[in-house]
Image (cartoon, helix red, strand yellow):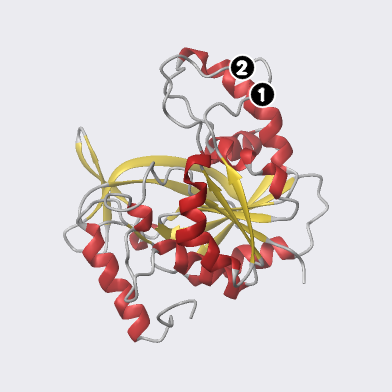
């Protein structure tokens, strides 16, 4: 079986565990967290390695609370995103507290990734179909067209909205072969009163948005060569970020978009009809818990998940 890894972005989990850290909020009937369901779905889809990207100061607690459970069922590796993990010749700008972003996080995991890999957020529930689609794409033969092959799960916009406020989504446009043409970041998207539509709140009022549009939810699939893209691009980013030293971030969507515009990559948009869950607002927690209760009662998941 071909090795494929699931990389989980968890370095932003916070400086302590417990109250207020949304990635560790229990959402399942037996105290399961969202990460548990993502790992379960990934393993079921065929992924056979989990990579946690965390901070070094969280290592002992993370292993005890999460890692040791997962190590019993699959291979696990750890990588550490630290703000001072920079190329030679660069230093942390004075006053910088913000991490360097998702691209830097994956770059920090380069020494433990040697296989095709998917990347997800720690605090998002993606459903089963996206993991199956990404795994099958990564485990398959790579087309020999001279371009880097990247894939992403494309979620139906209407399945990703919150009932408690506006959200920001990257709305995708594709060609007839399902290849990504571009992503337009759209802010403050809400459900319309009918419940079946969507609109973006703008200074000029509500702008209708197609609820059937496919959007990116930061669920990506990459081949190993993408790590070299990250290594080459990070120093360039740091030089260009000197005008925003405290806030600039090296982000996966921007990096992918740059490769797309340069004609260096084909990005396949793999549609999934699954409903996305996330705790964007405090008020989302109750609805997310009820959603997982229904998934368990419908037999989609066992509880507890890992015995």
Q: Mark 1 packing: few (<14 Cα in 10 Å), some, or many (20+)?
A: few
Q: Residue 142, labelled with which disc? A: none
Are there few (<14), some (14-19), or many (20+) residues within 10 Å of tag 2?
Answer: few
Judge whether 268 appears above or below 203 on screen.
Answer: below
- Circles 1, 2 touching at the beta carbon (< 8 Å): yes
Name which residue lies at 53% across and 60% down. Answer: 67
Residue 163, can we see it?
no
Name the residue: 24% across, 66% down: 287
Residue 239, position as x, y percentages in the image: 59, 16
Q: Where is mark 1, residue-wise?
A: 87
| Picture coordinates of residue 98, whole percent (x, y) | 42, 29
* Left or right side of 180 for 146: right
Between 292 and 65, the residue placed more toward the observer is 65
Q: CA distance from mark 1 to mark 2?
A: 6 Å
Task: Report if residue 110 is visible in the image.
Answer: yes
- Reading the image, the residue beneath label 2 is 90
Instruction: Name the residue rendered at 33%, 85% in the picture.
Output: 297
Counting from the top left corner in percent of width and height, residue 105 is at: 56, 40
**Percent from the top left, x then y, of residue 18?**
31, 53
């Amino acid at each position: 079986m071909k090795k494929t890894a699931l990389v989980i972005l968890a370095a932003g989990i916070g400086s302590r565990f417990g109250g207020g850290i949304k990635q560790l909020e229990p959402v399942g009937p037996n105290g399961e967290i969202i990460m548990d369901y993502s790992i379960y779905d990934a393993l079921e889809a065929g992924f056979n390695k989990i990579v946690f990207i965390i901070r070094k100061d969280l290592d002992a607690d993370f292993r005890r609370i999460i890692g040791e459970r997962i190590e019993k069922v699959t291979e696990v590796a750890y990588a550490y995103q630290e703000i001072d993990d920079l190329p030679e010749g660069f230093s942390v700008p004075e006053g910088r507290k913000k991490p360097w972003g998702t691209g830097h996080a994956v770059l920090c995991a380069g020494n433990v990734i040697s296989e095709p890999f998917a990347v997800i957020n720690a605090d998002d529930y993606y459903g089963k179909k996206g993991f199956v689609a990404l795994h099958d794409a990564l485990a398959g033969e790579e087309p020999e067209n001279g371009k880097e092959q990247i894939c992403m799960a494309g979620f139906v916009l209407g399945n990703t909205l919150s009932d408690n406020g506006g959200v920001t989504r990257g709305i995708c446009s594709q060609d007839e072969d399902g290849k990504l043409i571009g992503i337009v970041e759209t802010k403050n998207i809400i459900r319309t009163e009918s419940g079946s539509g969507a609109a973006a709140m703008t200074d000029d009022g509500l702008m209708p948005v197609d609820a059937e549009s496919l959007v990116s939810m930061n669920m990506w699939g990459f081949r190993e060569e993408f790590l070299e893209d990250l290594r080459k691009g990070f120093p360039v980013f740091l030089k260009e970020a000197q005008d925003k030293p405290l806030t600039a971030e090296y982000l996966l969507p921007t990096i992918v978009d740059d490769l797309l515009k340069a004609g260096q990559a084909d990005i396949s948009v793999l549609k999934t009809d699954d409903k996305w869950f996330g705790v964007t607002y405090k008020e989302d927690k109750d609805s997310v818990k009820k959603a997982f209760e229904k998934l368990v009662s419908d037999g989609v998941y066992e509880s507890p998940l890992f015995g």
